[in-house]
Amino acid sequence: MRKRLKKNMSIDDLAVMVQRGFENTATKDDIADMATKKDLTGVAMKKDIEDLRNELGNKLEGINRRLDAMADYNRRIARIERLVDGLVAR
């Protein structure tokens, strides 16, 4: 483990560091176009989107079950049609 060497810092060094920090700070004009909490009222939040995803997933599962049932019905109808065609051909 490396030990940190203590560096004696003068008031002037500290002032320079603080000044650099202020140079990188946004001003009111810089953030004027950003959205506020009030602007975001009514916007879908993560939980809202997750709830919608779950609801949509449930609906899609139901649709898939119905499509599977319809495919099964179509197979049964095709089988019945083949049986009827065989009876008619006799």
Image (cartoon, rainbow, N blue to C red):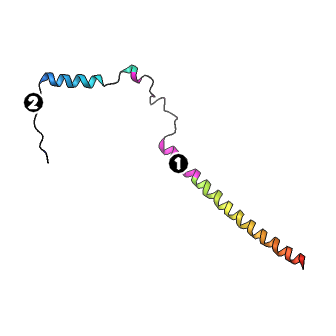
Q: Is residue 10 left or right of residue 68?
A: left
Query: Residue at the spot x=45%, y=24% of the render?
Result: 33
Q: Which residue is mark 2?
A: 8
Q: Nearer the viewer, residue 21 or 65?
A: 21
Q: Amino acid at mark 1?
A: Asp
Q: Residue 77: where, in percent of width, then height?
A: 78, 68
Please provide the residue range marked out in magenta.
30-56
Residue at point 52%, 39% (across, down):
44
Relative to 55, 85 lies left or right = right
Q: Residue furthest top?
A: 29
Report the side of 68 relative to 27 (left or right): right
Q: Residue at x 55, y 47 (%)?
A: 52
Q: What's the amino acid at mark 2? A: Asn
- Provide the secondary structure element on which disc 1 rests: helix
Residue 65 lies, in percent from the top left, at 64, 61
Depth check: give the residue in front, 2 or 34: 2
Most foreground residue, 46 or 30: 30
Rendering coords of residue 2 (x, y %): 13, 45
